[in-house]
Image (spheres, rainbow, N blue to C red):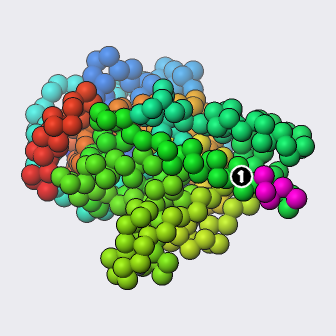
Amino acid sequence: MNEEKIAAVASVLSQWNPLGENARNIKDLDGYRVEAADIVFGLKVRGNSGKPERLVMEVLNQAFDLNLTPPELHRARTENLGNHGEGLGRAIRSPQPGSREGLRKSAQPLTFTLCASVPRTKNVDMLVSAEEEIQQVKMKRPHVVILGAGASFAAFPNGDKSGKKLPLMNNFIDILGVESLIKKTGLVFKSNNFEDIYSAIHENPMLSEIRAELEEIVYGYFSSMSLPDEPTLYDHLVLSLRHKDTIATFNWDPFLVQAIERNMGRFNPPMSLYLHGNVKMGACSSNHHMGINGTHCRQCGNEIKPSRLLYPVGEKNYHNDKFIAEQWRMIATELKKAFMVTIFGYGAPTSDASAISLFKTAWGSVDERNMEEFEVIDIRNEDDIRETWSPFIHSHHYSVEQNFYDSWIANHPRRTGEAYLNQFLEVKFIESNPLPRNANFQELWDWYDVLHGYE
Ligand SMILES: [Zn+2]
């Protein structure tokens, strides 16, 4: 049944051929089959309230990096369907320009044909219920989650347990109360951004004492932060991923470590990595294992020594520090295996250009892979997000959410892989299983126990 619908929509798309001649340059186009599956799925999910034109536009724009606009869709709908020449919009994947000729005058309007091809009746065979999803444990590949400052800020907009605010780059100096120390440098900075200020201090060897004092204050500030007693977004995140998954954080704050610590008695936590060092994590002097500061290495018994924090300087070198080099080696390995990557609150500042290229090398440029999902959770507007992550958005399915609780993780906890397989490979409709965000710890653990029981 589903196959028939997808074939019907694919046939409409092939006749319309929004890519024009550029379609020939796309080897895996397969008669727009993938896009057809997305449209069938989208129509089902949005039901009668969805606007088919808008959905078609979104699917095609994402798949081919076109800039189709509503007027172009309207023209395709009302004037003609066939396009064997110039593609609509701007096709970055296939930049060769084509010529516009051979339009089919007799073709039916797009929306009419689409709606006729896709009866929107409910069909239970096509739906995977939350209960069925819970019972499935099929995915072995990791879901990789990357956290930036925005994630901690989203978790604690009013501060940590004792009301300590999470600083962002542009209010860092103010929140940490280091204005007078910064004044002592005698420098004039081009902005109030911590990245610019720290970089300038770092470049000047005469300011090494001020730099050391600044680093000590920063380390102390983050070390003294702690999670509130009740369940937080960090607890929800840690509990919603399985042991095969990975959370890599750019944040120095201790929230991820603390959330893992307080939930790991009941659940085997996901792997955690600390890409810029962390105030709670370190490794033994022989670098056998990483661990929580103050504990001992399982292999040699030596005490775990704190990691150094990687500060925001223009040219970061991820290989100078053993601990940080190892974190980057491991994230690259996990990204290569990932079926889904979620970037949460990480704005990819300019000083992190090398981070983006490392991510791209590890995950984004593997041509023979397909259908991976790239998800961004970010409060910035979608244009900024598209600009930052364009290398990934060009070649993968992607979604953008403003709120963690709208994400794949929060709606398919511990089963993002199964939800992904059901939606994209089985082309089925999936029911959400949102985590109970207002539950206390006992209720929360009992809820996750049901999922854990099938694993
Ligand atoms: Zn050791």
Residue 93 vs residue 396, the one in the foreground: 396
Report which residue position mark 1 lands on: 213
Quarter of the displayed picture in which ligand 1 can be seen: bottom left
Q: How many marks?
A: 1
Residue 325 x, y percent position in the rendering: 56, 70
Label 1 packing within 10 angstroms: few (<14), some (14-19), many (20+): few
Query: Magenta stretch mostly in which secondary structure?
Result: helix
Region of the chain picked out in magenta, as a range: 206-210
Which quarter of the figure has residue 208? bottom right
* Residue drawn at 28 percent across, 56 percent down: 269
Does 139 appear in magenta?
A: no
* Residue drawn at 88 percent across, 59 percent down: 206
Res 299 visible: yes
Q: Is residue 237 left or right of residue 367?
A: left
* Residue drawn at 50 percent across, 78 percent down: 285
Q: Quadrant of the C terminus?
A: bottom left
The kind of residue on which mark 1 rests is Glu
Examine the rendered structure and indicate whether residue 356 appears above or below residue 342. Answer: below
Q: Is residue 123 left or right of residue 283?
A: left
* Residue drawn at 9 percent across, 52 percent down: 453
Res 367 visible: no
Residue 365 x, y percent position in the rendering: 53, 63
Tag 1's secondary structure?
helix
Residue 36 x, y percent position in the rendering: 35, 41
